[in-house]
Image (tube, rainbow, N blue to C red):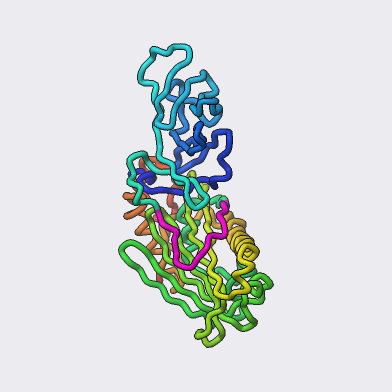
């Protein structure tokens, strides 16, 4: 079952200019370009003539995408033609659907209904921007990392709490048929950037998120309160993070940042605050991307791993990856070579798994 039945953000809209661009999704290559009207178009990145990558070609003045090998050209519907043999039929390339929204380009199969497009709207929140980060690991490893905050004191340096406060972290997680929901609360570590959002020493950091699988994404809602938890600080951040599988060992993160500012002074400076929010979250994501290389070969199976209470969402998320996103088990995907998946070595290992 192809993951292109879901809309995935695959590229920042600003990155698609005059030249075609190749993107990868679950082991397949696609080419994006802008036609004569400036609208984005997408095809499978494979010329039907001799399988050359269409992304190595160019966009003609009439907006058709021309193959760089023999000049075959295609419109946004994939209808193609040969310049040296115009009478040749069945020259079409496989067309995809692409939607430009929220500052990104979203790719799906041509027949996917538009209403399946994920909505990032949230009352009172204003878009601050979108950025991408490459994670050199399989999708399930990236998802595991973003399913718990237990690693916060060791991997991160800005949001969250210090090692000294790990014993006082408040935590709750709930599993549902279509999602997981997680909540953390602890004393915010000293951070110059958090002070920029009206956070005071001793305030509590709250991180609540929902992980969904149509496509895979975690939608983080971050806010701060006074130590009692009753007084909200003026800034809230909403960060939907889409985890887009490229190949077996590569996952593209497309991160949208939105901010809600309840203080008039902060509101007047909303563009500056938005840039600060982008910078802070991008640095946090990059911390994860740097460390994730150390655990990139973590197998899908959790046999042999000694898990704790913070790992409860991981187990359920793996089930939902198979059931809702892939539509098949990890073993079935591995058997047919989907995305050239790595072998899951722990199925032969002994040990206990708890959550």
- Which percent across, then down, holds residue 307? 45, 69
Q: From which residue to which does the magenta span run?
A: 118-133
- From what the image shows, is residue 232 above or below residue 111? below
Q: Quadrant of the C terminus?
A: bottom left
- Res. 159 image quadrant: bottom right
Question: Can residue 351 be seen from the camera position used here?
Answer: no
- From what the image shows, is residue 1 above or below residue 125? above
Which residue is located at x 47 percent, y 55 percent? 242
Q: Is residue 347 magenta?
A: no
Q: Please give left or right for residue 276 compared with residue 184 in the image.
A: right
- From what the image shows, is residue 177 above or below residue 17? below
Q: Please give left or right for residue 1 compared with residue 122 in the image.
A: left
Q: Please give left or right for residue 41 compared with residue 295 in the image.
A: left
Which residue is located at x 53 percent, y 71 percent? 236
- Which percent across, then down, holds residue 63? 50, 29
- Which percent across, then down, holds residue 163? 61, 76
> Residue extending furthest bottom?
228
Q: Is residue 126 magenta?
A: yes
- From what the image shows, is residue 344 above or below residue 86? below
> Residue extending furthest right?
192
Question: Can residue 188 be seen from the camera position used here?
Answer: yes
Which residue is located at x 34 percent, y 51 percent? 115
Q: Quadrant of the N terminus?
A: top left
Q: Please give left or right for residue 22 compared with residue 318 in the image.
A: right
* 61 vs 288, nearest the viewer: 61
* 120 vs 44, nearest the viewer: 120
- Which percent across, then down, holds residue 71? 51, 19
């Amino acid at each position: 079952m192809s993951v292109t039945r879901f809309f995935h953000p695959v590229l920042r809209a600003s990155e698609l200019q005059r030249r075609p661009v190749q993107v990868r999704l679950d082991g397949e290559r696609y080419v994006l370009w802008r036609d004569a009207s400036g609208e984005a178009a997408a095809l499978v990145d494979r010329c039907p003539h001799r399988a050359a990558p269409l992304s190595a070609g160019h966009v003609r003045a009439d907006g058709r995408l021309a193959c760089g090998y023999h000049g075959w050209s295609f419109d946004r519907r994939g209808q193609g033609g040969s310049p040296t043999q115009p009478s040749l039929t069945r020259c079409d390339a496989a067309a995809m659907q692409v939607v430009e929204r929220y500052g990104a380009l979203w790719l799906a199969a041509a027949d996917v209904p538009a209403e399946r497009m994920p909505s990032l709207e949230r009352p009172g929140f204003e878009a601050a921007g979108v950025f991408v980060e490459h994670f050199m690991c399989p999708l399930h490893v990236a998802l595991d990392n973003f399913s718990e905050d237990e690693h916060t004191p060791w991997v991160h340096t800005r949001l969250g709490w210090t090692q000294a406060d790990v014993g006082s972290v408040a935590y709750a997680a709930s599993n549902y048929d279509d999602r997981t929901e997680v909540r953390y609360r602890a004393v915010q570590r000293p951070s110059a950037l958090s002070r920029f959002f009206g956070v005071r020493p001793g305030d509590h950091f709250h991180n609540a998120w929902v992980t969904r699988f149509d496509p895979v994404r975690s939608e983080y809602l971050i806010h701060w309160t006074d130590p009692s938890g009753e007084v909200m600080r003026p800034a809230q951040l909403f960060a939907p993070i889409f985890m887009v599988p490229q190949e077996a060992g590569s996952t593209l993160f497309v991160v949208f940042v939105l901010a809600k500012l309840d203080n008039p002074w902060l509101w007047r400076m909303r563009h500056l605050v938005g840039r600060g929010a982008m910078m802070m979250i991008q640095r946090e994501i990059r911390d994860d991307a740097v460390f994730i290389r150390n655990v990139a070969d973590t197998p899908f199976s959790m046999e042999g791993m000694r898990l704790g209470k913070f790992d409860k969402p991981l187990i359920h998320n793996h089930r939902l990856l198979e059931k809702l996103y892939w539509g098949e088990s990890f073993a079935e995907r591995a058997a047919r070579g989907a995305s050239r998946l790595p072998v899951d070595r722990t199925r032969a290992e002994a040990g206990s798994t708890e959550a």
